[in-house]
Image (spheres, grey):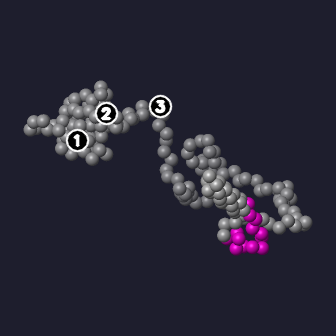
Amino acid sequence: MSDKVTRQKLLLGLLGLVLVATLWYQFRDASPADPAAAARGGAPARPAATGATQPVQVGLDRLKAERPAPANAGRNPFRFGTAPAPPPAAGPSSPAPAPSGMGPVVAMPTGPLPPPPPPPIPFKFIGLLTPAPGDKVAVLSDGRTVVHGRAGDVIEGRYRLLSVADEAIQMEYLDGRGRRTIRLSGA
């Protein structure tokens, strides 16, 4: 029984020693005069407290100085197009160079916007079955399900499989929009 008590006391003493060493390591202070301690990973050196502090110069007088007025360039960021041309000066006329970085002015179309294109067809062509010579069945996947079909079949009630070849298929929406060629690689 005394062997067990001695072992517990030894372990308790060792645990206390580890705790003291850990606390010393965590809370030790590296002095500013000891850069080697800071390099070893000690606490960052704190600046020495001095009685005199230097005031920061802000330069508030520059805020009160008069600023130059902005030049009226005739630019309106809320209107499309370029600035109107300045009135012609007296003398021989020469064509004015186009502003740098700007191409010719293109008139905006009027009327309603065309309908947006349909979303891309989500299927990938992952395989080809040939149950009989000349009969090709495309195997398609959208990441969730696997479907198959022959040329002319309707897939999921939204797409038509137009043609099936060895390396690619052609699909489109039932209304004829969004025709897409899908290669066997799945891209």
Specify the farthest residue to the right: 51
Determine which residue is flagged by label 2.
Answer: 145
Q: Amino acid at mark 1?
A: Gly
User: Which is nearer the N-term, disc 3 or disc 2?
Assistant: 3
Q: Residue furthest left?
A: 133
Task: Tell me the residue that label 3 is attached to.
Answer: 111
Q: Nearer the viewer, residue 83 or 10?
A: 10
Q: Which mark is residue 127?
A: 1
Q: Earlier in the sequence, mark 3 or mark 1?
A: 3
Query: Is residue 80 something one can see in this rendering?
Result: yes
Label 3, label 1: how many angstroms apart (C-alpha)?
45 Å
| Numbered circles on residues, count | 3
Query: Magenta region: which residues?
Result: 27-39
Could you say where residue 178 lies in the image, as x and y percent from the top left? 33, 35
Label 2 sits on a secondary structure element that is loop
Quadrant that contains the C terminus? top left
Amino acid marked by disc 3: Gly
Q: Is residue 181 visible?
A: no
Question: Reading the chain from its start, which is encountered first: label 1 or label 2?
Answer: 1
Which of the pair 39/133 is nearer the observer?
39
34 relative to 167, above or below: below
Residue 129's x, y, as percent?
17, 38
Observer-nearest of 16 and 98: 16
* Distance between mark 3 and mark 2 Cα atoms: 42 Å
| Mark 2 Cα shell of 10 Å, populated few (<14), some (14-19), many (≥20) | few
